């Protein structure tokens, strides 16, 4: 009788221990904030695509800066709103390296553009998973544009992003405070439309910041290199993992 009671007691301990293990596993799954590859790709896509106020949105606007029709109303420093994005732009003009006070067609051959983008939007994951993203955009770039030919410019520059992201999935809600940086190197692009897709050049960036799920907080850092291919897409390599994928520069769609 005593042996039976002891076995029953041991069985209860085993069951309780097993339940605790299961609870720990579930808690670890719920509380984990290690970003998946899909989440990393989504964040990099947001940094690059025009639909999410990424670098391509700034390049599309820059394609107008060496076009006299852009200054039809005499606005050198201006604010623009397009869809959900608000642009604040400050411009400086140069002719053969000498700053001039205004845009003079045929004389001005380079422009310095200080661009600040803000706005709010919500969009589905570009990978087909990971639920939805809510974005409070706040990004700034200093770009240097040089006219190479009548219909071609070269863009260099750098920028920083302090946007706020919320990723809502069935598993959890993840809040990301971005402290990201990027640099454009010898990005060659056509001007005058109908598109401004770069045909050459690279972007080196780091998607960084703080991720929190309400329980845990973790610093994140996702270095990447993006190479423009001239077909409206960019090929991205995540430096730490070597993961490579392609992003549609207009929609942000991720192609693997």
Image (spheres, rainbow, N blue to C red):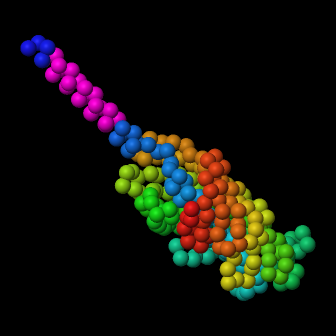
Residue at x-position 85% and y-position 78%: 149
Please state the horizontal and vertical placement of residue 251, each as a whole percent of the image.
56, 71
* Quadrant of the frame with the C terminus: bottom right
The answer to which of 172 and 94 lies nearer the viewer is 172
Residue 217 drawn at (x, y percent): 48, 42
Identify the residue at image location x=37%, y=51%: 171
Residue 49: x percent and y percent? 60, 67
Between 182 and 187, the residue placed more toward the observer is: 187
- Where does residue 83 sit, x and y in percent of width and height? 53, 76
**Which segment did they paint magenta?**
5-24
Residue 247 in view: yes
Q: Is residue 31 rendered to the left or right of residue 79?
A: left
9 is higher (above) or lower (below) than 104: above
Residue at 79% over, 64% down: 186
Q: Nearer the viewer, residue 131 or 129?
A: 129
Left or right: where does residue 99 sit relative to residue 252? right
Residue at the extreme left? 1
- Figure quadrant of residue 9: top left
Determine the main secondary structure of the stretch shown in magenta.
helix
Q: Nearer the viewer, residue 202 or 68?
A: 202
Judge from the rendering whether residue 165 lies leftward or rightward of residue 151; answer left or right: left
Task: Say if the magenta span includes residue 251.
Answer: no
């Amino acid at each position: 009788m005593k042996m039976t009671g002891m076995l029953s007691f041991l069985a209860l301990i085993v069951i309780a221990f097993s339940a605790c293990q299961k609870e720990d596993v579930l808690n670890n799954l719920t509380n984990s904030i290690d970003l998946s590859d899909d989440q990393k790709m989504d964040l990099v896509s947001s940094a690059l695509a025009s639909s999410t106020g990424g670098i391509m949105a700034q390049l599309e606007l820059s394609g107008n800066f060496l076009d006299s029709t852009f200054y039809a109303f005499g606005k050198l420093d201006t604010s623009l709103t397009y869809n959900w994005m608000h642009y604040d732009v400050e411009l400086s003009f140069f002719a053969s390296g000498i700053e001039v006070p205004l845009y003079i067609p045929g004389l001005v051959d380079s422009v310095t553009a200080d661009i600040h983008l803000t706005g709010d939007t919500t969009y589905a994951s570009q990978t087909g998973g990971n639920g939805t993203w809510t974005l409070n955009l706040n990004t700034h770039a200093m770009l240097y544009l040089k006219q190479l030919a009548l219909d071609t410019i070269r863009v260099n520059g750098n920028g920083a992003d302090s946007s706020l992201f919320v990723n809502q999935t069935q598993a959890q809600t993840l809040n990301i405070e971005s402290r990201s940086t990027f640099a454009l190197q010898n990005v060659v692009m056509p001007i005058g439309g109908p598109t401004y897709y770069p045909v050459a050049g690279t972007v080196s960036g780091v998607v960084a910041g703080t991720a929190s799920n309400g329980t845990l907080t973790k610093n994140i850092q996702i270095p990447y290199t993006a190479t423009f291919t001239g077909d409206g897409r960019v090929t991205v390599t995540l430096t730490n993992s070597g993961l490579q994928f392609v992003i549609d520069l207009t929609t942000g769609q991720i192609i693997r």
